[in-house]
Image (cartoon, rainbow, N blue to C red):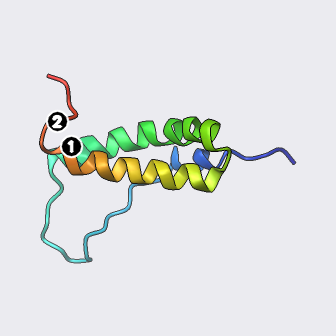
Amino acid sequence: MGAEDPAERYRESKPRSDRAVGSTETTTTAELEFSAFFREQFPLSVRTIFLIVHDWEGAQDLAQYAFIECFSRWNHGTLKSA
């Protein structure tokens, strides 16, 4: 059995919602844009970080931290190009 790329499972996973069931909150355009960006870039980011740290779980953790920081700045327009 060959080694499985743990980042592969993120490619076809559906985004989870952290909102409570029955919540009246709506998803903003920025959240939708970031969600698409995350689904596209996260697997590549994990693989790239793995090449540096040589640990899949560590690479996933570091990528998650990076995307959390990215999301916190996403809505401010500091990461998006004009």
Quarter holding residue 36: top left
Q: Is residue 50 left or right of residue 10?
A: right
SS at circle 2: loop
The vertical placement of 17 against 22, above or below, is: above
Density class for disc 2 (Cα within 10 Å; few <14, some 14-19, many ≥20) is few
In percent of width and height, residue 8 lies at 60, 44
| Residue lying at the far right of the rendered structure | 1
In percent of width and height, residue 70 lies at 29, 45
Residue highlighted by disc 1: 74
Q: Is residue 53 left or right of residue 23?
A: right
In percent of width and height, residue 31 lies at 22, 49
Which residue lies at the image location 25% right of the left edge and 70% below the top edge?
Answer: 19
Which image quarter holds the C terminus? top left
Amino acid type assigned to the residue bearing label 1 in the image: Trp
Amino acid type assigned to the residue bearing label 2 in the image: Thr
Density class for disc 1 (Cα within 10 Å; few <14, some 14-19, many ≥20) is some
Check whether the beta carbons of the residues at disc 2 and disc 1 lie within 8 A of each other: no
Which numbered disc covers residue 3?
A: none
Which residue lies at the image location 15% right of the left edge and 45% below the top edge?
Answer: 75
SS at circle 1: helix
Q: Is residue 20 left or right of residue 37?
A: left
Most foreground residue, 28 or 43? 43
Most foreground residue, 30 or 79? 79
In percent of width and height, residue 62 lies at 48, 51
| Residue lying at the far front of the rendered structure | 53
Residue highlighted by disc 2: 78
Counting the numbered discs, the total is 2
Q: CA distance from mark 2 to mark 1?
A: 7 Å
Which residue lies at the image location 51% right of the left edge and 56% below the top edge?
Answer: 61
Which residue lies at the image location 28% right of the left edge and 43% below the top edge?
Answer: 34
Which of the two discs, 2 and 1, sits closer to the camera? 2
